[in-house]
Image (cartoon, rainbow, N blue to C red):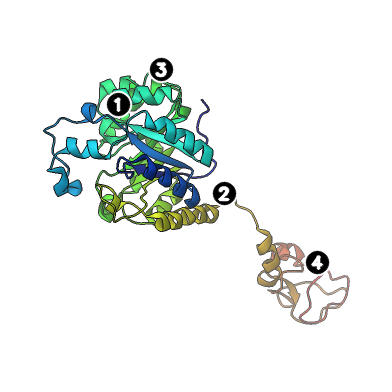
Amino acid sequence: MKNLIFKKTFIIAEAGCNHNGKIEIAFKLIDQAKKCGADAIKFQAFNPDDLVSKKAKIAPYARNKSYKNSQYELQKKISLSLEKFFLLKKYSKKKGIKFICSAFDIKSVDILKKMKLDIIKVPSGEINNLPYLNSLKNNTNNLIFSTGMSSLKEIEFLKKHFFSKYKKKKMSILHCTSSYPCSNENVNLNTINLLKEKFNVPIGFSDHTTSIDIPSYAVSMGSKIIEKHFTLSKKMKGPDHFMSLNVSEFKKMVNKIRNTEVILGNFEKKIFNVEKKISKFARKSLVAIEDIFPGDIFNEMNISIKRPGTGISPMNYYKILGKKSKRFFKKDSLLKL
């Protein structure tokens, strides 16, 4: 499979489980993500029986009376059978949007490998799961690692024991804070610079704030990938809808990111054509400040530097001083050689 090359910010609409276990909603999420301008849509693949024990409790942010504080019951209700992801991949291809999945257990990894996805996402919760990481061996997929809840030491472990076994061009790391929703003081975008310095792979940002602006800030700091939760409606039942962007918000976020890319430009310092038009008005030239006759010596008393910038550049001022004038220059006229 081709390595990921980020010519522009790669924007992922994180549908996650916001389909509520219904493939019809998943199809609609794909439709809307494409209309919003996302480059990819991402779902979460897992088997509840392999993901969570029946006694595991629900994280506080996701609690709902209908789930009786059982994470197992919640995951059963919002999961899709792994076979349905083949249909979602096919539909995404038809719509012209890249299909990505996070795998939350080893069986799901195996299914996604069989699907021959261009990209598999490694969720934050699996960074310290060595058997899971080993299940990714010998894969041909591009891997994106989320690093929420991870220490730098844990990410460096990936670099030493995992990245070295694969082509670096197939690896990407996302800065992430696992808080739902994430408050501004916990975003810590400066981590992006740290990850860029420490790891020679593309760095991105998985954003769990409710802001449509913060992703564009991350892009301005060099993020090559932006991932953001996406829903058809914040009012839908489910653990993630309330902190996801709706269709209108997601489209605005995409526009802000693309505008940021335009503003950032490139790493070349050059004179723009629009500046060339202004320079003749804003820059200066050598000007006669009294009548100068042929044979007169140019000196500090008869020449000065004034606008416009259409004559001899002031950079030649010291070269002109002491030379004889070969012609007449009327006071306040531009000098000419």
Q: In which quarter of the image is residue 214?
A: bottom left
Q: Nearer the viewer, mark 3 or mark 2?
A: 3
Label 3: which secondary element: loop
Q: Residue 157 carries which label?
A: 1
If you read the primary sequence from the N terminus, does the residue marked by circle 3 or circle 4 appear first? 3
Q: Give residue 71's mark.
A: none
- Residue 90 is left or right of residue 303, and the answer is left
Can residue 201 be seen?
Answer: no
Marks 3 and 1 in Cβ contact (< 8 Å): no
C-alpha span from label 3 to label 2: 37 Å
Number of the front mark, 3 or 4: 3
- In this view, the mark in front (3 or 1): 3
The residues bearing labels 2 and 4 have C-alpha atoms spaced at a distance of: 44 Å
Q: Looking at the image, which residue is at 29% across and 50% down?
A: 241
Dot 1 or dot 2: first in sequence order is: 1
Q: Earlier in the sequence, mark 3 or mark 2?
A: 3
What quarter of the picture does the C terminus occupy?
bottom right
Q: In this view, does 69 lie above or below 264?
A: above
Asked if one can make out residue 332 in the rendered structure from this viewpoint, the answer is yes
Q: Which amino acid does label 4 sit on?
A: Lys
Decide: few, some or many residues near mark 1? Use Cα within 10 Å; few <14, some 14-19, many ≥20.
Answer: some
**Distance CA(mark 3)–CA(mark 1):** 18 Å
Q: Mark 4 points at which residue?
A: 323
Where residue 257 sits in the image (x, y, percent)?
47, 53
Which dot marks residue 266? 2
Q: Is residue 56 above or below residue 229?
A: above
In the image, what residue occupies the spot 25% across and 47% down? 238
What amino acid type is highlighted by mark number 2? Asn
> What x and y, as percent, mark residue 327?
88, 73
Q: Nearer the viewer, mark 2 or mark 4?
A: 2
Q: Element type at marker 1?
A: helix
